[in-house]
Image: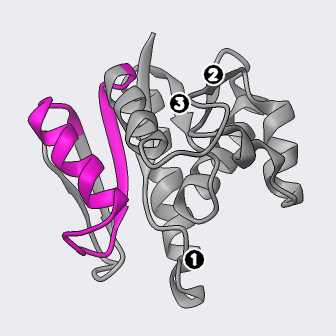
Amino acid sequence: MKFCCVTGPREIPMEKTKYIRQALRREIEQAIADGFTGFLSDMDKGANLEFALIVADKKKEIPELFLEAVYPHAGRMKAKNKRIQGLMSQSSGLKLISQEYNRDCQFAANRYLLESAQRVIAVSDGNPKGNTAQILRMAAAKELEIYVISLSEPEETVSTD
């Protein structure tokens, strides 16, 4: 099974939400066309949640798709967001990195995503700091396929394969 994971900001500007959803849907559909059937998300809000919602929707058409929820710590599983709760029941699998929050659990979750995936879809604002930038550096070092959806340039998606 070929896996694709996602990374991106927790907050998407309201005026960019429709564009990001369309771009994520396009990239997920392309991944499916390229033979990817496994999709990984930490189910956090923002880009990761949008990605998971789209994959869950695609699972209705293509039941063999596999959506794995990757939680850095158990506290994330207690989200009160109804969309996240609904996704938990639609996920095919669950990976819990740590029972309790610690300063390394997010890095460990990122490492798990990149050890499992062959492709990364990233929503990026170009900020060289933060979780998305860290995942992109790690993915580049592993020579994974990287597709970047730019928050600053809504006209294009950049491929680095």
141 in the magenta segment: yes
Element assignment for label 3: strand
**Residue at x 31% of width, y 75% of height:** 125
Tell me, yes or no, whether the two marked residues, 1 and 2, touch with CB atoms within 8 Å.
no
The disc labelled 3 sits on which kind of residue? Phe
Q: Is residue 146 above or below residue 37?
A: below
Q: Which residues are magenta?
A: 116-145
Mark 1 to mark 2 CA distance (whole Å): 25 Å
Image quadrant in which the C terminus is located: top left
- Crowding at dot 2, Cα within 10 Å, few <14 / some 14-19 / many 20+, comes out as many
Residue 91 appears in the rendering: yes
Outermost residue, top side: 1
Amino acid at circle 2: Leu
| 86, 79: nearer the viewer | 79
Which residue is tagged 1? Answer: 17
Query: Residue at point 46% right, 67% down?
Result: 9
**Which residue is label 2 attached to?**
65
Counting the numbered discs, the total is 3
Cβ–Cβ below 8 Å for labels 1 and 3? no
| 136 on left or right of 101 | left
